[in-house]
Image: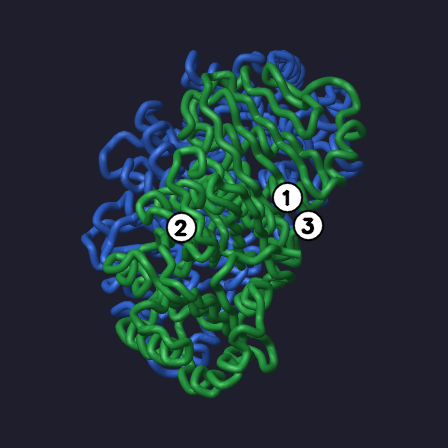
Chain colours: A green, B blue
């Protein structure tokens, strides 16, 4: 059971955007105006809701509501897409009793088609009825696309002024790569925070969590991570000590969600924790970690439970990072498999069998070239991933 | 029927490196010393045969023989791997009656294990017996790994001094990406050429062909492209006009082989010709072409015969290239699907159905930002690719 942050209400509805009788519309409303931080996709093509959120946050540090839908991305829909967003904000604002400008929209689904406004309108009574009856897990469920389960994580921390609660929800199972995933994540918190500080915390922690998971290396048009802090606990986080505690809690929640994203990768069966150390720079370590984590050959070997270390070494060698190849050491779990330019002797396959059979596989690469490091979580690549994505629109 | 370049003999044998009774050892011998150009993998981990070839070509511009095996890559085998190469060069040199230093080795297969020299020795009598009986297609077959068919292309051209012949053979169906594929290619020609010029031709044309095919974006430790010209035709290619004709023929042969590599991609069913124009620079065009050609989401959509233009646009938008998104236009075949930031109206799926059903799919992206351009050939991503690579070692 999650201890819920105070001052938020939730609503969901099944509008039928893509499938009948499936929750696909969610709403989070904060009683008090909530300080809001946002991090968005770096794709040049920014979906209409992303553009609307950016604009809204540029003119106000607080918001009252987030409305999210699955089934339609409202991306590559031109200016009409922005107008459709505004219509939605107006409708939802009326329903929740807040100004339209205080409603942030987020969408996920197929790129291209316009929002089906008639379905939105038809769903409003059910959404209204649900307000205050639903919980954050329902919203997490309404934003699922190919996700097989909803993703929620929470923390409670004691600050000097008292207890505050954080809860995060996320979706996203494919089109996940460097610089945000097709990923929506919303964090709600009842602490009272400084807006600039809160924004810095979200940027830093999203970078350390969501930006370090790899499913397929794609970066979507709709990636959105929002963090709300509404102060409803009455507890202020303004001392350095309190801020450190709260930032750590944000980190824990986002890391837990990021892990869940990879664990629920489209068709995925494995989570590889690829940890690169000993690089000439952090940037070089990142090149290696991402090359290994995106390599289809490494990812299919993970799926096959095959400790095919040659593919890992090969991906590191073509990553663009500079290091002396004879210095690279590679471990799967605790087992040293490669050093001094050649595999370790002994029956590696037998030693590695239990490591590869586990669902979480640690892969540690030391480049022997410096002190730079980087870590990513990567999924495997499976027949099921192909099936899901070859058939997604049909 | 190929008209064979003069002065070359071929041999093959089934040594049993990986499977019994399968051709896995090939030999090309040139009667006269042949001018030899080479292009090799850019991976930091260079397989032993790659290191040996580089050294050999650094000290001599001519060679007499190429020996190739499949089933074992002799990569990540340390100094022992180089010593094993030298043993092989000696054995094969004795067999062919040429100095060991004039024998270039090439290997493809699993990374890690040492060459099985006892199997090499046992296969020598059969290889000797085959010398002069086999043809280049047999060698092309002996170097196959997961390839489903051997790949050979040839040209005959008339130079001012007479007729010369070129023939190329290649292998490689996976681990194929930027900067050479897991790819071996050998071109034999009977023209008499200047070594420096010949080397320039191979570098340039390999870059325009093999370096522009994408199966999975990986770059192997063993990539090797060698081009031999032995002068056995007695025809010299030293005038500018003759050189242009011969260079064009090299280009034609390498492009034909590169196309065959993609057509025979592991599990592949489609060849996408991704042509990017209107970029601010050729480098930006290349970023977009490679992002689209490596995107698992684009590649699975191709497999699903789904004209999922949103994924193409999305990959272009996250490629790192800079362009005004509202200027991008996208065509599948002759059908304009996206312009001015939104999809074209009309029943695109119906219009695109015949385009997507074809085995070759032209995807043209204009960025509206300049005159830079780049083209790649990319395969699709299929369940079969995953099966092949999840099970490759077992």
At horizontal 73% and vertical 19% (from top left) the residue drawn is: B117
The residue where tag 2 is placed is A192
- Element under label 3? loop
Q: How far apart are marks 1 and 2 (CA)?
A: 36 Å
Which quarter of the image is occupied by the N terminus of chain A? bottom right
Q: Where is residue A247 in the image (x, y as percent from the top left)?
A: 46, 40
Label 2 resides on the chain identified as A
Front: mark 1 or 2:
2
Vertical relation: A305 (above or below) A183: above
Which quarter of the image is occupied by the C terminus of chain A? bottom right
- Element under label 1? strand
At horizontal 61% and vertical 24% (from top left) the residue drawn is: A330
Q: Position of residue B338 (x, y in %)?
A: 32, 70
Query: Toward which corner of the image does residue B394 lie, by quadrant?
Result: top right
The residue where tag 3 is placed is A269
Q: How crowded is mark 2: few (under 14 residues within 10 Å), some or many (20 or more)?
A: many
Q: Is residue A317 left or right of residue B67?
A: left
Q: In this view, does B103 lie to the left or right of A64?
A: right
Front: mark 2 or 3:
2
Label 1 resides on the chain identified as A
Q: Residues within 10 Å of mark 3 (few under 14, many from 20)?
A: many
């Amino acid at each position: 059971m999650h201890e819920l942050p105070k001052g938020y209400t939730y609503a969901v509805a099944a509008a039928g955007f893509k499938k009948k009788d499936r929750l696909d519309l969610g709403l989070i409303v904060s009683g008090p105006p909530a300080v809001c931080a946002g991090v968005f996709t770096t794709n040049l093509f920014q979906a209409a809701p992303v553009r609307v959120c950016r604009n809204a946050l540029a003119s106000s540090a607080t918001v009252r509501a987030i409305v999210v839908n699955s089934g339609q991305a409202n991306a590559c829909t031109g200016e009409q897409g922005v107008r459709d967003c505004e219509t939605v904000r107006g409708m939802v604002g009326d329903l929740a009793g807040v100004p339209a400008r205080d409603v942030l929209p987020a969408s996920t689904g197929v790129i291209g088609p316009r929002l089906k406004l008639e379905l939105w309108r038809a769903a409003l009574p059910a959404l209204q009825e649900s307000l205050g009856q639903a919980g954050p897990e329902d919203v997490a469920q309404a934003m699922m696309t190919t996700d097989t389960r909803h993703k929620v994580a929470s923390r409670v921390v004691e600050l000097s002024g008292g207890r505050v609660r954080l809860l995060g929800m996320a979706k996203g199972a494919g089109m996940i790569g460097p610089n945000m995933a097709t990923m929506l994540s919303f964090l709600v918190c009842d602490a009272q925070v400084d807006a600039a500080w809160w924004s810095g915390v979200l940027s830093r922690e999203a970078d350390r969590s969501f930006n370090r998971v790899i499913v397929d290396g794609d970066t979507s048009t709709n990636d959105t991570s929002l963090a709300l802090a509404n102060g409803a606990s009455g507890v202020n986080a303004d001392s350095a000590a309190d801020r450190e505690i709260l930032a750590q809690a944000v980190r824990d929640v986002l890391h837990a969600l990021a892990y869940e994203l990879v664990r629920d990768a489209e068709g995925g069966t494995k989570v590889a924790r690829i940890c690169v150390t000993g690089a000439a720079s952090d940037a070089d370590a990142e090149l290696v970690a991402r090359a290994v984590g995106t390599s289809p050959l490494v990812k299919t070997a993970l799926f096959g439970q095959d400790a095919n270390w040659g593919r890992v070494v090969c991906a590191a060698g073509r990553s663009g990072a500079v290091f002396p190849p004879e210095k690279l050491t590679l471990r799967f779990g605790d087992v040293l498999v490669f050093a001094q330019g050649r595999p370790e002797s002994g029956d590696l396959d037998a030693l590695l069998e239990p490591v590869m059979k586990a669902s979480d596989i640690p892969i540690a690469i030391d480049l022997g070239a410096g002190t730079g490091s980087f870590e990513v979580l990567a999924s495997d690549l499976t027949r099921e991933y192909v099936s899901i994505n070859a058939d997604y629109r049909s």
